[in-house]
Every structure is written in structure tokens, then in C-alpha cells.
Image (tube, rainbow, N blue to C red):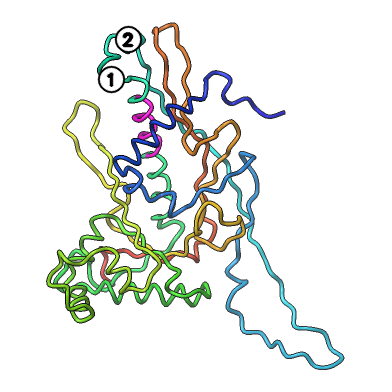
Amino acid sequence: MPIDLASAATYRPELAGAVREYRSEYAINDQFIGQRVLPVWESLIAEAGFPLMSKENFRKLVETARTAGTGFSRSGWTWDKGTFDCVENAHEIPVDQKEAAKYAAVIDYLEESAIGADFIVALASEKRVADAVMNTSTFTATNVAVDWDTVATSTPLADIDAGANVLEDQLAVGRNQLSLVLPRTKWQALRNSAEVLTRMQAWNSGITGPEAIRQNVVQQYLDVKEILIGRSSYDSADEGQTQSFSQMWPSRYGMLALLAPGPKAPRQTLCLGRQIRWTEAMPDTITIETYLDPAIDSEVVRARQFTDELVQAPFAGYLMDLDAAS
């Protein structure tokens, strides 16, 4: 029997619509790249085994010629075994009914609270993806030749070439299928690199300085599928203290990776990983619900989701330590 996950609350599609409108109006999704790095895969069950592609399936040179009267060339196609376990992540904001009525002509407290709760859950989701991907326990980080922040002498184009060569060998895909994932500060270092400016000017005479180097221009020159820039940050100070902002995507690391082309990609797609989302009673990626709490005379707005962040193929990612010189 299905679990009634929404028994204590009511799904509010009109509030979800307000959240989507806000996200679109202020381009909120542009600062979040987590669901592009690990695209959502929807699951009807919360916990299960998950077959993971083995790198041993690739790039073996086999003698395929068949001699008459003999069998055909044959080898195993193996799968590693993984698991996922979707965890509930949620945030609630109580809306005092008297306060909401008092200021109803000025502000819709329910809508504003839905937007706030959604953003908090989305921020936490972004952090989980960043922690899963920029993870030196899962991936071995390769040092760049020169710290990217040393823009006068850094060689980011050579560093990226080295990573692309590794992944093309390992994955049997072209460089133009790879995505470059960078934190905001290291994107700025890449754009301001003397090496990049010199190469860009030789390639495109219309580029006169770093300010003319745009994301799509570098992407085209690098011959990669896309550049994803982690722009989100969070306040790491305690409540009531002076704000101290930290980058969601750690400024030390960048990654070249083969990513799933989106949520519609089949489960067996060779890719870095997926964010598994349990869909039971959860119609949206982040579902907005409300319920009454008589003890505080409030309507509580809740944003929640059930997810697990799964790295499927570590060999589909090339992690770079952008601070440490080799």
C-alpha cells in the first residue's frame, strides 16, 4: 500500500506556481547548477539497488575476426552495484494568521513564505550536489600546472586539454560532449588569464581585453559542450552575527565531466551521476504544502523533497585542483 506522505499537509499548486514565476522572473535557476550536473532521475521507490556502469566495459581492443567453424569473439559486459536511499529534506515557515490578515493588502505572506522555503531547500540541494561532485574521497584530484589565480602565468587551457584527453580515452566520447564545471571565482580566473586573452585575441580579432571574453566564446574555443558556473553562496555566520558568505561550489576545484543530457535520459545512460528523486506524493521537484497549526494560530508553509545524490561513474569526471601546482 502506498505511503500517504501528504496526510498532514495539503499540496498547494497555486503556491508552487508563484514559486516558479518568481524563479523565472529573477532568473533564480541560473545560479543553481546542481540539477544540470546531476540531473534528476525520478523513482517510484525510495530505496533500491542501482546498476553502475563499469569502466572495464570500455576501450578494450579485441580480436573480432571469426574463423570458419569457430565461435564468435565474446566478452562480459559487467555492472557494478550501487544503491540509493532518498532522504527527506524540508523547511517550514509558519505564517501567523492575524499578521497575514493585517497586512494582506500589502503582501501575500503565504506566497512569500513559499518562495522563501523553496529557496532554502534548493540551496541545501545545491550544497549536497557540490559536496558529492567536488569530493576528493570519490575522485582523485589532478593538480594544475600553475594556480589559476596567478593569472599572469597560469595555463588553464593546457590544464583543460589534459583533462579532456583523459576523458576522451576513458569514455570513448568526443571532447564536445564534455561539460566544464567551475566555481564562480575560478571562472573569473580563467577569463582573466593572460594565456586565455592571448589565445582569444589570436582566434578572434574582435576581443580587445578580458572584458570581451564571454562564457559562450570560451566554451566555443574550448570545444566543450558547456561551461557550468556555480554562482550560489550561503551565509556561514551564526544568526545575528555579521554576514560571512561562502561559495556553494568550493573555490579550489573544477571538473570536466560527461553529464547526463537531462532528466529524460534513461537510467543506464553513461554519465557522472544523477539526483534520484522519490516521487511518491511529491508532484514537484520541490513540493509546496501547507497545514494548520492551531497551537500558534498559524498556517505553516512547507517545502520538501526526497532525494539522494548518486555518483554513478567516477571515471566520467576529471577533478582538477585549481590551487595546487604540480
Magenta region, residue range: 113-122
**Which SS class for mark 1?**
loop
Residue 45 locus on image (x, y percent): 64, 40
Crowding near pointer 1: few (<14 within 10 Å), some, many (20+)? few
**Overall secondary structure of the magenta stretch?**
helix
Which residue is at 52% across, 72% downward? 171
Q: Is residue 7 above or below residue 287?
A: above
Residue 208 locus on image (x, y percent): 12, 72
Q: Amino acid at mark 1?
A: Ile
Q: Amino acid at mark 2?
A: Ala
Tell me the residue that label 2 is attached to.
101
Quadrant position of the N terminus in the picture: top right
Q: Is residue 200 left or right of residue 120?
A: left
Q: Is residue 43 above or below residue 268?
A: above
Tell me the residue that label 1 is attached to.
107
Which residue is at 20% across, 67% downward? 213
Residue 204 tag number: none
